[in-house]
Image: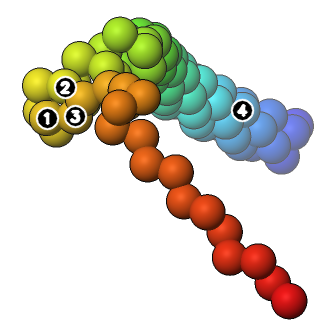
Amino acid sequence: MTKINIALGLSLIVCALLLINSQYQARRLFFELEREQGLSKQYETEWTQLRLDQSIYGKTSRIESVARTELNMVPVTPDRTQFLKAAEIK
């Protein structure tokens, strides 16, 4: 009878330790999930900002404005156009 009680007591202790370990793992995984969800939200915000920047900087009017002001470029006009003739190959 005592051997059965000892075996049952040991199995109860083992089960209790396994329960504690599984609760610890569940908490650890929950915190990791929360952290990853926070990173996901941060990346989504950055992606939205990058798409907005791309739409702003990709507009033709913005490109023309930067070309005129920062690069001192002017539009091509017919009087400034030069035509070259290709040499004939014999």
Residue at mark 4 to residue at mark 1: CA–CA distance: 78 Å
* Callouts 4 and 1 close, C-beta under 8 Å: no
Q: Position of residue 62 (x, y in %)?
A: 31, 14
Dot 3 alpha-carbon crowd within 10 angstroms: few under 14, some 14 to 19, many 20 or more: few
Image position, residue 74 (x, y; %): 24, 29
The answer to which quarter of the image holds residue 53 is top left
Q: Nearer the viewer, residue 90 or 74?
A: 90
Q: Tell me the tag on residue 72.
A: 1
Label 1, label 2: how far apart the Cα atoms are = 5 Å
Would residue 26 appear left or right of 32 to someone viewing this image? right
| Most distant residue in the bottom direction | 90
Q: Looking at the picture, which amino acid does disc 3 mark?
A: Met
Q: Which residue is mark 3?
A: 73
User: Residues at badges 2 and 3 in contact (C-beta under 8 Å)?
Assistant: yes
Decide which of tag 4 and tag 1 comes sooner along the chain: 4
- Disc 1 marks a residue whose amino acid type is Asn
Q: Kindly identify which residue carries mark 2.
A: 68
Question: Do tag 3 and tag 1 residues touch (Cβ < 8 Å)?
Answer: yes
- Let me know if residue 43 appears in the view: yes
Cα distance between the residues tagged 4 and 2: 76 Å
